[in-house]
Amino acid sequence: MNNNIKKNILWNTIGSLINAFTSLFFLIAVTRINGVKIAGIFSFAFSLACFFQVIGTYSGRSYQVTENNKEVKDSDYVTSRYITCSLMMLVTLIYVLFKSYSSFKVSLIFILVSYKLVEAFAEVLYGILQKNDYLDKVGKSLLLKGIFGTLGLVLIDAITNNLILASLSLILINILFVLFYDLKNLKSCKIEKGKFNYKIFRYGFYAFCYAFLTFYLVQAPKLAIDNYLSSTKQGVFGVIAMPATFMALCSMFIVHPYLNKLTKLYNDKNLKDFNKLFRKLVYFLLGIGVFVVIAAYFLGIPVLELVYSIKLKKYLYSFLVIICGSIFYSLSILFQNALTVFRKTGIQLVIYLIDSGLTLFLSNYLTKHHGIFGASLSYTVSMLTLAILYVIIYIYENSKIKKGLNYGKEE
């Protein structure tokens, strides 16, 4: 492993960890300062913002980085991001119009969606940097935004006890970093003048659809809780579900540094080394998963009670069920990226449509009749189904490639 890869992996890992755990730090602070009921509203609003962010990022950074169509330029992705971010805000407006939320909840939703909108725009810049082998700069940007964003929200909320004002600081901090840090980093890359290229929306449509459905699967329990349970229950679920993000994070920061290499091996028709590297990533994730489950059983609830200062002992089994689901989800992310490299995106949409139909029924039924445990169980069944479908399709597509039946064909 050369020094550049090591540097990219190191900074991307650090930056991704800090950025991903900002939601954890946010929830801890809000729970302690504002109480579990307000934390429940914040948790739901934040999750909804992450859900709608998928519209802003459209096909996502993974698709952008692995794109090898010379008709689509990096600058075209930047131009298209203005459109997708506008759609992101429009969908948010339509959603809240059909809900009877309080003015506080509506305000918090719009503020956090705006915060995620800035992140969505930054993602397209990160894609350009990653394609030019500057993933370390992406990691440093995520690190700084995570640190200053967390400090801003926690300090302002602690001093003013005003969550709205504290959340507004997240928007300001992220805008400043995009203007004075991220855009400055792009000077190291050669970027042609941007234009509107409709092909981005056509080529990335399937990737967007299954990314959107992915986030629906992850957020479905919280949407069901919003329909049937209280904000306090939403807060409790947010707390016990938060550690599950660790597994998803592991999958993402393990895969991202190797995306370029996997793509190169595939484009070079070196399927043997591709599969060898891919198997190592699978085994590594499984190893982490076993460790996390054991740690969660013995330490999870006591640590969460200490950190959040709320009683959670009766939610142990709900917590463990969610952790198991997160392992299945992390594996799905890995297989999703592999199939994206294969440019097998159409079949992935079928996978998500099947699983989303199941989840739509399960999440509402189980949450309504079994509360938090039902929401937890619906999440894990959904993620297990997703993982099984992905493994089946990956094995099938890999065998076809070995036989040379569909190498490089996009679906």
Image (tube, grey):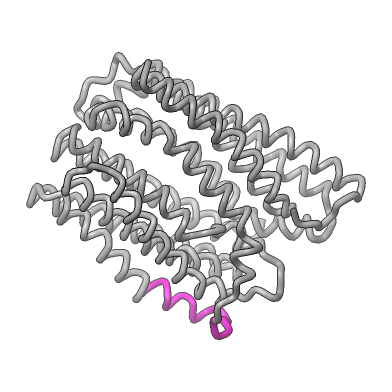
Which is more toward the observer, 107 or 42?
Answer: 107
Up-down relation of residue 330 to residue 312 (above or below): below
Q: How many marks?
A: 0
**Residue lying furthest bottom:** 193
**Residue lying furthest left:** 160
Q: Residue at x 16, y 36 (%)?
A: 32
Q: Is residue 3 magenta?
A: no
Residue 175, position in %: x, y? Answer: 31, 69
Residue 172, position in %: x, y? Answer: 25, 66
Determine whether, in the image, residue 101 is placed left or right of residue 322: left
Determine whether, in the image, residue 397 is placed left or right of residue 131: right
Q: Magenta segment range?
A: 181-194
Determine whether, in the image, residue 348 is placed left or right of residue 127: right
Up-down relation of residue 305 to residue 62 (above or below): above
Residue 193 visible here: yes
Q: Residue at x 80, y 38 (%)?
A: 396
Find residue 100 and report its image quarter. Answer: top left
Find residue 119 and report its image quarter. Answer: bottom left
